[in-house]
Each structure stands twice: as C-alpha cells, then as structure tokens.
Image (spheres, rainbow, N blue to C red):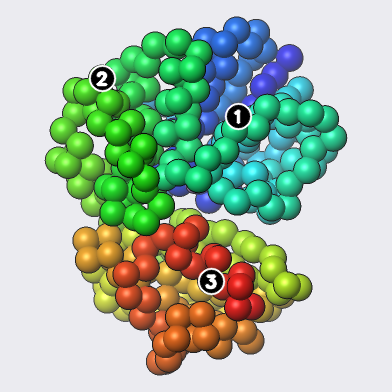
Amino acid sequence: MKTFIIGHKSPDTDSIMSALVMANLEKNLGNTNEIIPCRLGNLNKETEYILNYFKVEAPKLIDSVKGADEVILVDHNSFLESAPDIADAKISKVVDHHRISNFQTKEPLFYMAEPIGSTCTILYELYRMNNITIDKTYAGLMLSAIISDSLLFKSPTCTPKDIKVAEELAKIADIDINTYGLEMLKAGTDLSSFSASELISIDSKEFNANGAKFQISQVNTVDIDSVLKNKSEIEMVMNNLISENGLDLFMFVITDILNCNSKAIVLGNKASVVEKAYNIAIDDNIAFLSGVVSRKKQIVPLITENI
Ligand code: MN
Ligand code: MN
C-alpha cells in the first residue's frame, strides 16, 4: 500500500517542506503504508537552498497520483492546484491554510485548516498534539517554510502564532531567524537564469470566479526593474497562455521583499478589474500595488470580488 503526500503545482517552499514534514508525521503516527513525499513540479531556488542547507532529499517528482492507495494533500485543497487525476484518488487527509474551493471527496476524511501563515505552523501543532518529537532537521524545514510564506513575518498572512512557533523551531534547530531567513529569501530571488516562460511558472496559480478564469503568477525579488527588463518577452508568453487557456485575466506579480511592494504585469480582456480593485491606473500594462505582498490575502480576494 502506498501513501502519496503532495503539495500544490508550481511548488513553493511550504508545499515541499510540508510534504516532507507530513511524511515524517505519518510514520510516527503509525501509518504502515509506504509513505512517499511527492512534488508536482521543479524546486525553486529558495527551496533548493534550504534542502542543501539541511542536507535533505527533495520529494519525488510526479505528474499523476496513479498507483497511490491514498493521497494526503498539504498546502492546498483546490483540484485546480493538484495532480490532474486527483479527483479519482482517495484523499485521506488535508492539512492546509487556503480557502476551500474546487474540492470534494467521496469519503470522510481528516481535514485540518487554519487561517494562519504557513501549513508548517499547523503541522507543528499536529506534532505537539500527538506528542511527537521534532528533531533539529525537521525543525529547520518547518521554520524555513514559515519564513518563506510569511516573508520573514512581514506578510499580512502572518499571525502571532506563526511567529511564536517559528521562535520555538529556531530554538530546536539552533538557528538565528533573521540571519538565516534573509539569506534563504535572497537565495530565492536570483532570477537571472530563468527564461520568460520559466519565470511565469515559478509560482503560478489558476482561479475561477463568477464565470471568469484568471491566473496569477508571482516572483520575489530585491530589484523589480531587473525583472522588468524582460517585459516584452514575458508579455508574449503571457498572451500565448491567455489564448491557449482561455484566460480572462493574467497577472504576473513581481514582489520586492525588502520594501514590501509589488508591480504586476496585467493582461487579458478583464485587465480593468485590477484598476477597479485597487483604484489605480494601469500604465503600459503595469500596475503598481503599494504594500501588496500576499497573493492569498491581498490579491485573490480583491480580484474574485471585482471580476
Ligand atoms: Mn504554497
Ligand atoms: Mn503555504
């Protein structure tokens, strides 16, 4: 019997770490299946940095959940974000911190969700609830996921609980949060080697609302303008995806993690939704989103409401 544990497509650090941390939790809870942490895409540079730092092997790359007797979803629930054949799988557990959408199961399941900064914060609570010891390595992986999702506690998604848990984990892992956190985030902002289409797929999510289909990709950087040097090429790739996938709106959000602002390239027949949502004017397909860093909390709800 096999248990696959998967985070979302275009996996970020939280999805990768949550799969690894959940796999260890399942073993400790006595799940006797072969437990396989998986991923639905390539590692980003930040995640690579973390796995190297703690000398941990990446989850297994898969493109289907065929062969799994049960599947555990972490850091997502939407089937749009999951394996293409997820609707046919037996989902036994979900641990997540996103809104619930495009999700249903045939059978009862374990579902734990909280509106907090990181799936790994919830996993920490599950370890504690079950009296399972967190070793140095797993503490480091969880801490990294919290730092990543909360942009070192600066994102509006970050809650006091995330900070408290991160401090606990830092003690166990014997890590200085600020020094390590900045190094880790910066490792993720080296975008120089990416082509336009790779840039767009580093962290990309698709949404449906009010009969409209929209996609929001996001990258973190310390220099927005250096990413915008490729603007025309990026726009070409975005326009191709718009016609291929019938998108009404495509936002490519470039987030400055030091100043906590974003600029977005906005394309599609519903581009004006962004102007309405933020009460701003788009100039040459660029929207300046002052103080916006969180897609989950500061972009998706506003677009969903206005589209
Ligand atoms: Mn995620
Ligand atoms: Mn997350």
Q: Which of the pair 17/151 is nearer the observer?
A: 151
Image quadrant assignment for residue 268: bottom right
Say which residue label 2 marks.
172
Dot placed on the residue nearer the N-terminal end, 2 or 3:
2
Instruction: Mark 1 and ligand 1: say if the CB distance to the nearest ligand atom is below 8 Å.
Output: no
Q: Which of the pair 173/276 is nearer the observer?
A: 276
Amino acid under label 3?
Leu
Say which residue label 3 marks.
302
Q: Which mark is residue 5?
A: 1
Q: Is residue 149 above or below residue 119?
A: below
Q: Dot 3: what SS? A: helix
Q: Is residue 155 above or below residue 92?
A: below
Dot placed on the residue nearer the N-terminal end, 1 or 3:
1
Q: Name the mark nearer the viewer: 1 or 3.
A: 3
Q: Residue at x 59, y 23 (%)?
A: 36
Badge 3, how many Cα within 10 Å: few under 14, some, many 20+? some
Q: Dot 1: what SS? A: strand
Q: Dot 2: what SS? A: helix
User: Marks 1/2: CA distance?
Assistant: 25 Å
Question: Residue 171, percent across and down?
Answer: 22, 23
Q: Is residue 12 above or below residue 73?
A: below
